[in-house]
Image (tube, helix red, strand yellow):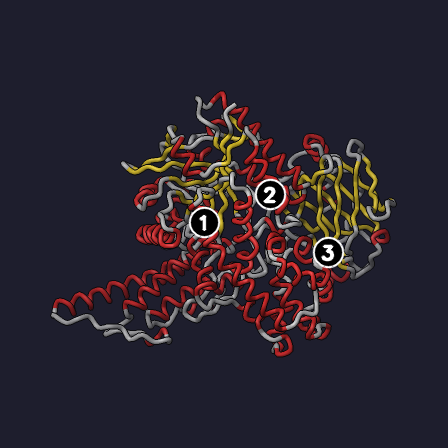
Amino acid sequence: MQPVSLAFFWHQHQPYYPNDLTGENEFPWVRLHGTKDYWGMARHIQEVPEFRCTINLVPSLLVQLLKYTDGNGSDRHLDVSRMPADGLSKADALYLLDHFFMANGDSMIRPSPRYHELFLKRRIGTDSAESALPRFTVRDLRDLQVWSNLAWMHPILFEVDPELRDFKHKGQSYSEADKAWLLDKQLAVLRQIIPLHRQLAEGGQVELTTTPFYHPILPLLWDKRLARQAMPGCELPRHLDSYRDDVIEHLRRAVAFHEQLFGEKPRGMWPSEGSVAQEIIGAIADVGIEWIATDEEILMASTGGRVSRDPHGHLRHPELLYRPWLVADGDQQLQMIFRDHGLSDLIGFHYQRADYVLAAMDLLGRVEEIGRATEPLNGGRPTLVPIILDGENCWEYYHDGGVTFLRTLYQEAAQRGAINPVCIGEHLREHPASDRIDRLFAGSWISHNFAIWIGHHEDRTAWDLLHDARERLKLATVRDATIRDATIREGEAPAEPRVSNDANSQTGSAGASPIRIAQAWQELFIAEGSDWFWWYGPEFGSAQDKLFDRLFRTHLQNIYALLGEPAPANLNEPIKRNGHRRLHTLPTGFLPVKVDGRATYFEWISAGIFESGSERGTMAQVTEGLVRRIHLGFDQTRLLVRVDTASRARDDFERTGIDELRIRFVEPEGLELAVIGFGETTLSVTLDNVGTSAGEAAIGQVFELGVMLSALDVQSGSVLKFFVELFANGQSYDLAPRETTLELTVPPPDFEQILWQV
């Protein structure tokens, strides 16, 4: 058997957070992911010299890294970290309590006793920062400053740096000198990231690729009507002008910046959000890019369904997915590869809950099986299996930061004779594409459409506001060019702009200066980034939704400020109307549920409802989990939970081998309910920590559970935070919600009367 070419493609990206006009930066994510993921992912590869893969580094991320390492870049979180704990203003102390627990509770806070102690003292979700502040001593606040940065250091750093390991082992009672030492160490790690990637590239272990500079959705910049290929009835923004020049500029700048930083032009590219269209192929090829990648659903749509998956995820004509393709625009052509989104989602969403060694072996076993199935159909060419996903966001859900999984995966992949880890560009040079796509479908890696970025009225409002600012900037640019041309024709040297720290004072002989116009175009390109649109509409949300909204509008306001014009009043109005939405609705009455596994409508009509798959913030899962919907609520004595699957719950559990369901509580802490024996209709519910019966469950059309509130030792007013997890053969199969918890308050006996009065 010919070895399978295994192509890992890690996408490293952050939105452009700084406000370059004021120097403010509200977000610490470049810095914190830098010391954890960007350093750690490169170090993992360095540990296994035989391993090969591809890493995509977005220019907007790299620019921000350089601000920290080559300049005096900072962010609000870092500013507050540096402040003496005994000199914090009340506003800074409240910021500390609201923002310094931004880490995964199970994998990044709970394992550190002192950080977890501070977390419990804060009582997030119960107390405001204002009410919690009196409980915190100066020592507590300083330790929190330390731990909020220390928890974001990659585990391997503690292996290779004895001083850092001893620092962590100290655990508490840190001094101001200790804190300053840690923040200096943090900066030293950030300074290693770009040189480490360049070293890996020069050694041939890693191919470095790029993305359009500020991560825009290129097809929508080119022609917003392209959204209608996948969504024929999609409402569009009012203004449909093409921004083709902006597409070319994002591409040109990305390639030039990459060459400046790494010494050679990139050959490959991950188009932002895997967004592609036939119309942009020529522009990408024009800047020297030889290959691009996107999701398998684009291939399916581009080949008329020749490649497709059945409801169980099995591929029709799998050999067509696991090979490169050609796409052309006149004389210009690119090679393309398409991600296996099932394998990619296993890493991003599922293996975090498994045994990590077994998970790595499982993934490699699946890759080998793909090779066995496709080799006879590939005409002597090696099978190419692309696994493509974000390189930073999923590891905080692995309890060891992904170390065991990645070490096992890389070492095993490099040693197995049946698998050949490859850099994508090198593989394509040795085994170039011969199959051709006649016309590339316009879509992204999420559901092969652009709904996330243009499908909601908030998205369209943002596009129209951006268009208005762009039109003003175009007029100012033409006016400036006309004045300068006239001056030169009259024999005068063009006036040099007066440079000032005040953006409004940098004027030339008339209107905005060339420097200010160039800055304004930079602000526009930043505002064209996909990330602002990601948070508009109902699909994704975070606690920082309003801040993202404000930052997008600030970039547009900066354009007007740089042109010396007042910004339109509507830029002061939030686009995001509802803020961070609740993940589920709340019960509106007691539920008269008979636990029998039947989907009896009127029993659950007053329940709260959670729709699975809607909660992801910075990541999106393409493959659907087994849990589709959860109903939740109470009667006078029981907590009631119903789980719906794609079809009949009993059949779906049997098909997937589900043999255990657990209700896992974050509050009350440590409490778990276990349900087993799905061959029976009526099931027992046991408290895992004591093994006693706590209620009843049943499975049929749906899974239903009723657990006595007395068994949970809770009463009216108690807060319950929990999630549902399914297991098959001892391994976690699905989780809902995937990122956070379902949250309910135990109602009083007169619950319905209170609601009726309100």
Quadrant in which residue 161 is drawn: bottom right
Left of 483 or right of it: where is 241?
Answer: right
Give the SS element for disc 1. Answer: helix
Find residue 598 and report its horizontal and vertical position in percent.
75, 37
Corner quadrant of residue 697:
top right
- The quarter of the rendered structure image containing the C terminus is bottom right
For disc 2, the marked residue is 407
Q: Position of residue 720 (x, y in %)?
A: 75, 56
- The residue carrying mark 1 is 199
Q: Nearer the viewer, residue 575 or 615?
A: 615
- As helix, strand or loop, the secondary structure at mark 2 comes to helix
Name the residue at the right extreme: 692
Vertical placement of 346 versus 142: above or below?
above
- In the picture shown, does residue 173 fall above or below 207? below
Q: Is residue 240 visible?
A: no
Q: What whole-number distance in Å separates the C-alpha atoms at marks 2 and 1?
A: 20 Å
The label number, if any, that marks residue 744 in the structure image = 3
Q: Nearer the viewer, residue 380 or 297?
A: 380
Question: Which tag is nearer the camera, tag 2 or tag 1?
Answer: 1
Indicate the position of residue 559 as horizontal and vertical percent values. Answer: 37, 66
> Which quadrant holds residue 204?
top left
Q: Earlier in the sequence, mark 1 or mark 3?
A: 1
Q: Secondary structure at mark 3?
A: strand
Report the number of discs: 3
**Among the two numbered marks 2 and 1 on one chain, the one whose residue lies closer to the N terminus:** 1
N-terminal label among 2 and 3: 2
Instruction: Check disc 2: other Cα within 10 Å, few if <14, some if 14-19, many if 20+.
Output: some
Residue in front for this viewpoint, 531 or 373: 373
Q: Are marks 2 and 3 in contact (CB under 8 Å)?
A: no
Q: Amino acid at mark 3?
A: Leu
| Crowd class of label 3 (few under 14; some 14 to 19; many from 20; radius 10 Å) | many
